[in-house]
């Protein structure tokens, strides 16, 4: 896997991960947040996403989360260079956004920074949660981020999600069955493809669907006020 590019408030997937583009049929009047639970800038912007969710609910505007597959499959060498890169990014994001990080993960002898399982967990939760304008899914996404970045637990392990499921009153046994299924692995791949069809490579990104057309509002770290201005002037 090629090492991802993270700078200036955004992380990008390598171009080689992009599937073939084709026509997408899009719904009307909706905001799509494109992120990855193990993207550090997505963790930094989590309070903004929560505020955007509330704004969309208050204004009867659809809201959807699409996972991006930032480092799907992992494969980066867990060496001093990579760990120094992560430490520098996390410190920078903490200073910029105020989101706290724990750094004990960087003391491990080995860690495979594969973001596919955490993305698959979001896709799984999406399939199990009620259709309530994604509010519970936003909470699930944020809880995964907090458990990884604050507790440095491993999202690749199914047991990682037990406490999160209990908090959101999801049946963990049912979640486990779906999370580990071939169906959810395929649905996650399809969601990565959908992200690409929206024209998004960098995370976090925000896309507005209006009159069956998709328009990128912004990519990278931003404020809630800036996002709302962009939405209201489109």
Image (tube, grey):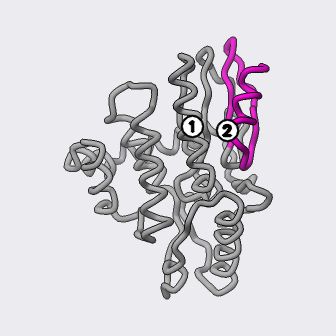
Which of these two is toward me, 72 or 39? Answer: 39
Which residue is drawn at the image coordinates 55% and 81% (left, top)? 106
* Helix, strand or loop at mark 2: helix
Instruction: Name the spot of residue 142 as percent of width and height, x first.
Output: 47, 50
Q: Quadrant of residue 103?
A: bottom right
Which of these two is toward me, 26 or 154? Answer: 154
Q: What stretch is highlighted in magenta?
A: 205-234
Distance from Cα at disc 1 to Cα at disc 2: 7 Å
Q: Do the residues labelled 1 and 2 touch (CB within 8 Å)?
A: yes
Which residue is the site of mark 1? 51
Which of these two is toward me, 166 or 160? Answer: 166
Mark identifier at residue 224: 2
Image quarter of the C terminus: top right
Image quarter of the N terminus: bottom right
The answer to if 210 sits in the magenta stretch is yes
Instruction: Name the spot of residue 218 as percent of width and height, x first.
Output: 76, 38
The answer to if 74 sits in the magenta stretch is no
29 is higher (above) or lower (below) than 65: above
83 is higher (above) or lower (below) than 130: below
Which residue is drawn at the image coordinates 31% and 60% (left, top)? 158
């Amino acid at each position: 896997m090629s090492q991802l590019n993270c700078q200036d408030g955004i992380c990008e997937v390598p171009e080689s991960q992009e599937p073939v583009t084709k026509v997408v049929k899009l719904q009307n009047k909706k905001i799509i947040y494109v992120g990855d639970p193990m993207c550090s800038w997505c963790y930094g912007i989590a309070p903004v996403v929560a505020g955007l969710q509330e704004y969309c609910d208050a204004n009867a505007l659809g809201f959807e989360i699409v996972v991006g597959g930032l480092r799907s499959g992992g494969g980066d060498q867990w060496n001093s260079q990579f760990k120094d890169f992560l430490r520098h990014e996390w410190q920078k994001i903490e200073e910029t956004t105020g989101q706290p990080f724990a750094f004990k993960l960087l003391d491990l002898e080995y860690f495979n920074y594969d973001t596919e399982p955490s993305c698959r967990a979001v896709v799984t939760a999406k399939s199990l949660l009620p259709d309530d304008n994604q509010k519970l899914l936003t909470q699930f996404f944020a809880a995964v981020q907090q458990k990884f970045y604050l507790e440095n637990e491993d999202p690749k392990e199914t047991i990682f999600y037990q406490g999160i499921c209990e908090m959101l009153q999801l049946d963990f046994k049912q979640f486990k069955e779906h999370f580990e299924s071939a169906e959810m692995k395929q649905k996650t791949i399809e969601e990565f493809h959908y992200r690409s069809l929206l024209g998004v490579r960098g995370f976090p990104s925000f896309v507005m669907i209006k009159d069956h057309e998709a328009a990128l509002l912004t990519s990278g770290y931003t404020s809630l006020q800036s996002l709302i201005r962009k939405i209201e002037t489109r």
